Image (cartoon, helix red, strand yellow):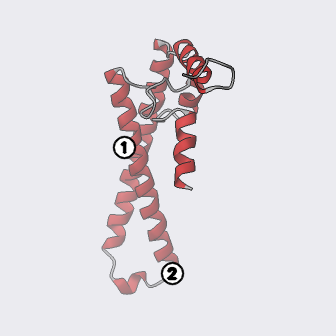
Amino acid sequence: MQQDRPGGTQGLKSTRKTMAKKRNLAKEQLRKIKATLVERRNQLKNNLKSGLVEIENQEGHHLADLEDIDNIQDNDAVFEVVNNASASLDQIEKAIEKIDKGTYGTCEDCGLPITVERLKALPFATQCIECRRKAELEVE
């Protein structure tokens, strides 16, 4: 059995749990974060609508009309914006749903609270910094 010592895994887990209790989101912080998410969701929906209208307008052209390389690059850029906005919108919708369910701010990997600082910077974060770093290292 490991002893609870500084730098040891038991000490780290104990410290993280103590810190987690101190980091619970206050109702006002949660309200502000949700308002930010809702505002961002509305912006993304508008961007998606604009992008989809632009794609729809361009699809009415014949291939001969689109042979210009600038038009092709513009189309690629519009598709990329729409794809990115759609992915972000999904993340934001999930975060709002978690707020409504009361599960927002909990790391999906370790179950500990995500720091308020991280949630303010990335309101749709689903992992704490430590778990996100581990996940990124596994990808490399």
Q: How many marks?
A: 2
- Amino acid under label 2? Ile
The percent coordinates of residue 34 (x first, y second) are 43, 26
Circle 2 packing at 10 Å, graded few (<14), some (14-19), many (20+), is: few
* Residue in the picture at 55% in, 16% down: 23
* Spatial CA span between label 1 and label 2: 32 Å
The answer to whether residue 36 is above or below residue 25 is: below
The answer to whether residue 136 is above or below residue 2 is: below
Q: Secondary structure at mark 1?
A: helix
Give 137 or 28, whichever is nearer the viewer: 137
Which disc is residue 123 wearing?
none
* Residue in the picture at 41% in, 32% down: 38
- Amino acid under label 1? Asp
Which disc is residue 90 wearing?
1
Rendering quarter of residue 11: top right
Residue receiving disc 2: 69
Residue 27 is left or right of residue 116, and the answer is left
